[in-house]
Image (spheres, rainbow, N blue to C red):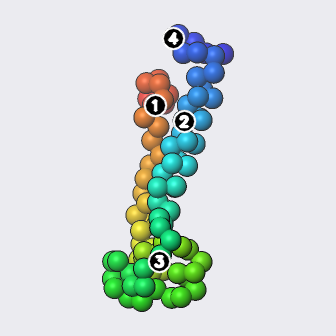
Amino acid sequence: MASGWASDDAVQEQIDSTIKDAVDRARSALPKGQASQRFCEECGEPIPQARREAIPGVRLCVNCQQKEDERQKVFSGYNRRGSKDSQLR
């Protein structure tokens, strides 16, 4: 049951919004394009043929991709659309 000005399904809307944001962020991080790079954009090392075939549009070698994944992990997942009360808890 919602209280104040919030609608009855406000909590579900917040959950849906958080999931949609996470999915959009993950999709935007996927490699784009058909042709994979032969050399890593970050370090210049060759990207193995098997990796290029497995992930069309790959641009980073495994080591640089791991570093990028760790950097992305720092994202807090803070929901900017939530109510002020839920952000204060």
Disc 4/disc 1 C-alpha distance (Å) = 15 Å
* Residue kind at label 1, given as amino acid type: Arg
Q: Residue at x 55, y 42 (%)?
A: 20
Q: Secondary structure at mark 3?
A: loop
Secondary structure beneath disc 2? Answer: helix
- Mark 1–mark 2 distance (CA, rounded to whole Å): 7 Å
Q: Earlier in the sequence, mark 1 or mark 2?
A: 2
76 or 32: nearer the viewer:
32
Residue 71 can be seen, yes or no: yes
Q: Earlier in the sequence, mark 4 or mark 2?
A: 4
Q: According to the image, label 2 marks what residue?
A: 17
- How much space separates mark 2 and mark 3, taking CA atoms? 33 Å
The amino acid marked with disc number 4 is Trp
Are the residues at dot 4 and dot 3 in contact (C-beta closer than 8 Å)? no
- Residue labelled with disc 3: 36
Q: Residues within 10 Å of mark 4 (few under 14, many from 20)?
A: few
Q: Residues within 10 Å of mark 2 (few under 14, many from 20)?
A: some
Choose mark 2 or mark 3, whichever is in front. 3
11 w.r.t. 37: above or below: above
Measured in 3D between alpha carbons, the distance from the residue under mark 4 to the one under mark 2, in whole angstroms, is 18 Å
Which quadrant: the N terminus?
top right
Circle 1/circle 2 CB separation < 8 Å? yes
The residue beneath circle 1 is: 81
Q: Tell me if mark 1 has few (under 14), some (14-19) or many (20+) residues whose alpha carbon lies within 10 angstroms of its own.
A: few
Q: Earlier in the sequence, mark 2 or mark 3?
A: 2
CA–CA distance between discs 3 and 1? 36 Å
Which of the numbered marks, if any, corresponds to residue 5? Answer: 4
Front-most of residues 66 and 40: 40
Q: Point out the residue furthest to the front here.
A: 34
Is 37 located above or below residue 29 in the figure?
below
Label 4 vs 1, first from the N-terminus:
4
